[in-house]
Image (spheres, grey):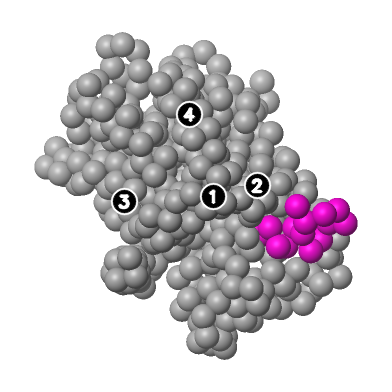
Amino acid sequence: MEAFSGIITKIDDFVWGWPLIILILAAGLFLTVRSGGVQFLHLGRALKYMMKEEGDGAEGEVSSFQALCTALSATVGTGNIVGVATAICVGGPGALFWMLFAATLGLATKYSEGLLAVKYRERHEDGHYLGGPFLYIEKGMGPKWKWLGKLFAIFGIAAGLLGIGTMTQINGIVSAFQNVAETPVVFNALGADVTVIGLVVAVVVTALVALVVVGGIKRISAVAEKIVPFMCVLYAVFALAIVLINVKALPEAIVAIFKGAFTFQAALGGFAGAAIKLAMQKGIGRGIFSNEAGLGSAPIAAAAARTKEPVRQGLVSMTGVFLDTICICTLTGLSIILTGAYTNEEGLQGAAVTQLAWSRSFPWSPTISNLLLACCLGLFAFTTILGWDYYSERCVEYLTNSKKAVLVFRVLFILFTFAGPFLALDVVWNIADIANGLMAIPNLIALAALSGVVAKETKDYFAKIKDNDPLKK
């Protein structure tokens, strides 16, 4: 197992090396320029569109808000708790800066993805919509690039089954609940101890996932619409309380964040010798893992939204990065840095680091803090599993155009979800990173190639609403 873990780590380091990091940042900067700085000029409008349904002529399967909640269900997950903690423990406080820097540029990336998804989506005979990078590659770049769309779909399926969609999520849930109470170990198959409570949680979560995913996008979006707003507000309230409780340490924490981001001193937590490269690599990598800007996953949900305006849905899609990373991940990162949890001597990692930050801040028993965070993480990860099932199923549909293939995949997805807790945490996260990185490459190529379409659609839309603003109706 140790040799396998070492191989996976080397592949992860190669995939998420400087070339991909630079490509993601460059794409975000390029799309910021081509869209006219849409994230700086129109974020307020985007937040208003998020809550206001479009009028006559809108077509799609679910409302724009439901499509956003479906996308958020997949993005607001263990990355917001486990991923942020991992990034700061390995890369130091500076990782949080790079996470936010990447997210700022990622707003334009996510906007472009949502816009293109609606513009190039297809309506099938049974009334459901299919769209995402595979279609805007094929239809936008031309049939000769269909192979690139298929490559994206293959990587999307791999990410759903082997990484971000299944194993990382349930692994995080089980680890969090195992930290609440000690029970006997019942399994130690592939480097991870699974206790009685962990096994029970794995069975329950897998069963709930199976009950929801059989209903497709409408059931997933209906569940997401109810759970996502509740879980985001619940977690934000507790995380903000930790920041306020430790507010006196805030100036020192901000200094540590900027020092870690721009100096070559070793990071305070994690491995000796961790420097600016690790801060950037882990901050950007975990940030992308969390908000998925550039991965091409969220536009698959955006394509199902009831809308006739690609730009409008692009703006709504953009709010996902703002809520996920700039709000929730920032609160998580600050709570970990303010409490010094990332420098723990116990060698804690993942959710246990965030749990330590909570237990150090609240006056009640650490067990209560651990249980509260475990419940928040459970909601985050559960909805992420649902969202990624939908994404991966649409990739299967694009590749096979077969309902039977989708059903077979659904069974495999449920089985892989259950298998997550039996793998060591570092192996699971590295596999997820690899799948994400490979998925991003064809999508970023398409976004660059179609940036002219993004620019034209953006310019035309804002010229059209200049004298007929839908927000004033």
Measured in 3D between alpha carbons, the distance from the residue under mark 4 to the one under mark 1, in whole angstroms, is 18 Å
User: Measuring 62% from the left and 30% from the top, which residue is drawn there?
Assistant: 227
Residue, disc 3: 439
Q: Which residues are magenta?
A: 354-367
Lower position in the chain sequence, tag 3 or tag 4: 4
20 or 420, nearer to the observer? 420
Lower position in the chain sequence, tag 3 or tag 1: 1
Q: Position of residue 360 (x, y in %)?
A: 79, 63
Lower position in the chain sequence, tag 2 or tag 4: 4
Q: Is residue 110 magenta?
A: no
Q: Quadrant of the C terminus?
A: top right
Residue, disc 1: 195
Measured in 3D between alpha carbons, the distance from the residue under mark 2 to the one under mark 4, in whole angstroms, is 18 Å
The correct choice, above or below, for 344 with respect to 164 in the image is below
Q: Amino acid at mark 4?
A: Ala
Measured in 3D between alpha carbons, the distance from the residue under mark 3 to the one under mark 2, in whole angstroms, is 29 Å
Dot 3 and dot 2 residues touching (CB under 8 Å): no
Residue, disc 2: 374
The correct choice, above or below, for 326 with respect to 273 in the image is above
The correct choice, above or below, for 255 with respect to 466 in the image is below
Dot 2 and dot 1 residues touching (CB under 8 Å): no
Measured in 3D between alpha carbons, the distance from the residue under mark 3 to the one under mark 4, in whole angstroms, is 28 Å
Residue 356 visible to an observer of this rendering: yes
Label 3: state its secondary structure. helix
Which mark is in front, 3 or 2? Answer: 2
Q: Which mark is residue 207?
A: 4
Label 2: state its secondary structure. helix
The correct choice, above or below, for 5 with respect to 69 in the image is below
Q: Position of residue 469 (x, y in %)?
A: 61, 28
